[in-house]
Image: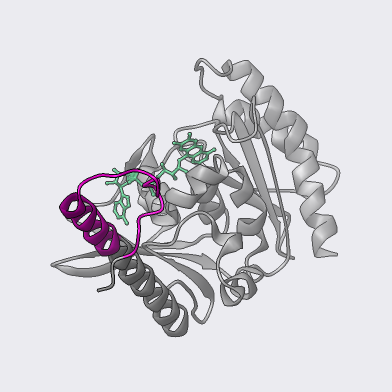
Amino acid sequence: MGTTWPTWLPRNSYPSRPLVAHLAAWWAAVRQDDRRRGELVRAEQQQGAAAGQVVGVEKHFVALAERLTERLPRQSEIDQKRLQLNPLLAAALPFVGHFQTRNKGTVCGSIAHADPASEIPLALALLDGEVVLRSRRGTRVLAAGDFQQGMLTTAREPDELITAVRFPIVQGGVAFREVARRHGDFAIVAVAALADGGNGIRLGVAGMAERPAVRRVPSEDALQDAIERLAWELEGYEDIHASARMRRDLLRRIGPVVAQEAVRCAA
Ligand SMILES: Cc1cc2nc3c(=O)[nH]c(=O)nc-3n(C[C@H](O)[C@H](O)[C@H](O)COP(=O)(O)OP(=O)(O)OC[C@H]3O[C@@H](n4cnc5c(N)ncnc54)[C@H](O)[C@@H]3O)c2cc1C
């Protein structure tokens, strides 16, 4: 291992020769460690992408694996192409915290945390996705609706790890909007819609109840009335960010806009 003069040590300083040798050796070892760690991460990333572990496309799903962060749109080109199969995620992810949060937070961590105002659990519930859980006892797969049971509460057993979250490949038009006091805050209310060509539109709402609520609403004349009924059914909760009344009002205002946007997107 060659020793080089440490850049942080001024050349005109005169510490003793053994001290300089010691510091230089230590610095070189640190740099070699960094290089090794970098190589390992790159190799893991290449292997992961090739084996479909990072973002895999299964028959009907885009599967996001355990260690994948919420910074999805900036992953490799191959991941971006796979994500195009799920435009709802691409629309919702920029609203998850700030870029620092998305760099560290993971998709599976967000699903495990089960915040009622979170964007990723909302997208999973709207699309009828699945959560893959693994423990020593084996692997089981739960539908999103069975997994998230209430406020920060899920069906995960203490010894289970979420190893993947499966988002169905979107067929149809999608739209997403949320209201927060500042960009990057948790949503006060978030609404996502899927116009899948079925009878009406699937509408998902977060921030109103203990977990994301998904209902089918009519696409035309009766839409506003259906959203009005949904607002009263979910009630909305009170916290320091908004009253239940304000939450109901937000749903009444953005619900129809998001539903109609999804219909236009499908056309
Ligand atoms: C400032 C800030 C702003 C944020 N804003 C938003 C926002 O607007 N919208 C939003 O949706 N989120 C937001 N978040 C949450 C954040 O984006 C992450 O989703 C969340 O913190 C989970 O992070 P994590 O993946 O590091 O999991 P951790 O914080 O490490 O874990 C969260 C919980 O899940 C468990 N867990 C984690 N991974 C797994 C796994 N694979 N299997 C089983 N259990 C697991 C942990 O044990 C823990 O109980 C924000 C966070 C911060 C700090």
Q: Quadrant of the C terminus?
A: bottom right
Please identify the quarter of the rendering in which residue 236 is found.
top right
Is 261 situated above or below 205?
below
Task: Please indicate, yes or no, whether residue 53 appears anywhere in the rendered image.
Answer: no
Q: Which residue range is magenta in the image?
A: 4-30
Q: Quadrant of the N terminus?
A: bottom left
Q: In front here: 24 or 265?
A: 24
Q: Position of residue 93 (x, y in %)?
A: 59, 51
Is 159 situated above or below 149?
below
Q: In front here: 263 or 113?
A: 113
The residue positioned 40% from the left and 49% from the top of the image is 11
The residue positioned 78% from the left and 40% from the top of the image is 256
Q: Position of residue 119 (x, y in %)?
A: 55, 45
Identify the residue at the far bottom of this view: 50
Q: Position of residue 158 (x, y in %)?
A: 18, 49
Task: Please indicate, yes or no, whether residue 161 appears anywhere in the rendered image.
Answer: yes
